[in-house]
Image (cartoon, rainbow, N blue to C red):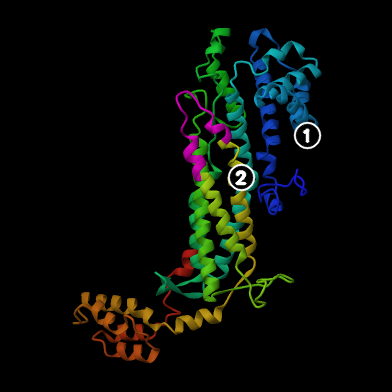
Amino acid sequence: MSALGHQPLSPLDGRYQTAMGDLPEYFSEAALNRERVHVEIEWVIALTNAGFAGVSALSPETISDLRSVVANFGETQLRQIADYEAVTKHDVKAVEYFVRDVLCENGLESLVELVHFGCTSEDINNVAYALLTKKALHTVWFPALQGVRDRLKELAQEWRQVPMLSRTHGQPATPTTFGKELAVFAHRLDRISPVVAQAQFPAKFSGATGTFSAHVATDPTRDWAALSASFIEGLGLEWNPLTTQIESHDGVAHVLSAVSHVNRILHNLCTDVWTYISLGYLTQIPEPGATGSSTMPHKINPIRFENAEANFELSCALLDSLASTLVTSRLQRDLTDSTTQRNIGVALGHSLLALSNVAKGLTEIALNRELLAADLEANQEVLAEAIQTVIRSEIVQGRSSIEDPYAVVKELTRGNKLDQVALQEFIAGLDISPEAKKSLSELTPQGYVGVAAALVDHLR
């Protein structure tokens, strides 16, 4: 072994470990084994409750004792499973033997053959992964997303009235307000995040090729599909009646694609905030003791947003690969999904790390109102749109004889910098009504923001 000893290979388990919060509780190998034990024990309870093979339902006390194994699952139980796997070379079989021991320890030796009854390994795994992914998204990832969304809404409200020069194609364009621009991102998140929050997680529990063949061979009179559905739905999942050996993964692919979409929206936010910082529209609040550059003492780098960009990209790369790989399996099954699913936590981990950086970055910025105002004042030509549009209206109303108002205003403004005096002189010479001239002469870039501020109220 290296002199460095055993070190984490992934930065998520090293440098960025603190940003992961409780995510490892759902996506570590230990968490997977704990959830497998959970599924195996619940299936035994379900079979006894159904009176299968003439057995009696377990007492509430015995059920509580069995479930406490999952609640108290830790290093001792992990070692016991690892010892079995060292012999079986099969992870789910090792879990099965462990649960058999649990039954024996609780005086239920007569029921050990109900452990893993009628199951293929995928019955246990697909349910375990569905439960873990659902719990992780709802308890760890989604709250982090909501924190970012809430901060965006807060800033959108705070800066809703602050006018800002827009830049379409990077060039000065019709003004907006800074708050409205942030509200756009919050609104985009509001459209896609419910896909994650309300996602259904399908699961199957139907044997080797999804046909209940072994079940029916054992007891042809029982409605095994109904029992399977009741079992899966009782765990809070959606029962999938039509599968091969594996659950088809369309449900998890759908939700992972939605997470990827969220990532891309926030990646766009990061690039915009980075640009606003570069333009000087946003300033960064210095963190005491922090260093921006090893050689340039003056610098405050937008590191939060750059870090988030990179990790959103890594997350999307993994999520996209997962979503495309998981939905394909040769004939009744292959094992490509087995190793692929072990990376769901990694994909969500990079997204969670990015979310934590965006959240912190959004608390470390301030608006440079003076520069925003100066930028608007220096770009009077952005009023060209308003002028040519008002002329069009005047023509329709029979108040102007100007031909091709767009061309007239373009001749004055395209590629030219105009000051307020030159623009006022142009307006004064236009063949339009006195009322229109007065309205245009009073218009400023700062006031040419339409109902931008009011649009923020469309946020929930």
Foreground pick, 297 / 278 = 297
User: For this view, does 119 lie left or right of residue 62?
Assistant: left
Per the model, the C-alpha gap separating discs 2 and 1 is: 22 Å
Counting from the top left corner in percent of width and height, residue 99 is at 73, 22
Which SS class for mark 1?
loop
> Residue 338 in magenta?
yes
Indicate left or right for 223 with 29 as reference.
left
Q: Earlier in the sequence, mark 2 or mark 1?
A: 1
- At x 56%, y 57%, the residue is 310
Residue at 35%, 91% in the rendered image: 422
User: Is residue 205 shown above or below 4?
Assistant: above
Q: Quadrant of residue 420?
A: bottom left
- Which image quarter: residue 404? bottom left
Residue occupied by mark 2: 346
* Closer to the camera in the image, 35 or 319: 319
Q: Which residue is mark 1?
A: 74
Find numbered disc 2 in the image and state the secondary structure of the residue it sits on.
helix
Coordinates of residue 153 in the picture (x, y in percent): 56, 61
- Identity, as a three-letter code, of the amino acid under mark 2: Val
In the image, which residues are magenta?
Answer: 320-339
Residue 161 percent coordinates (x, y): 51, 73
Q: Residues within 10 Å of mark 1 (few under 14, many from 20)?
A: few
Answer few, some or many: residues within 10 Å of disc 2's Cα (few below 14, many 20 plus, some between 14 and 19): many
Position in image of residue 65 (x %, y %)? 78, 24
Q: Are marks 2 and 1 in contact (CB under 8 Å)?
A: no
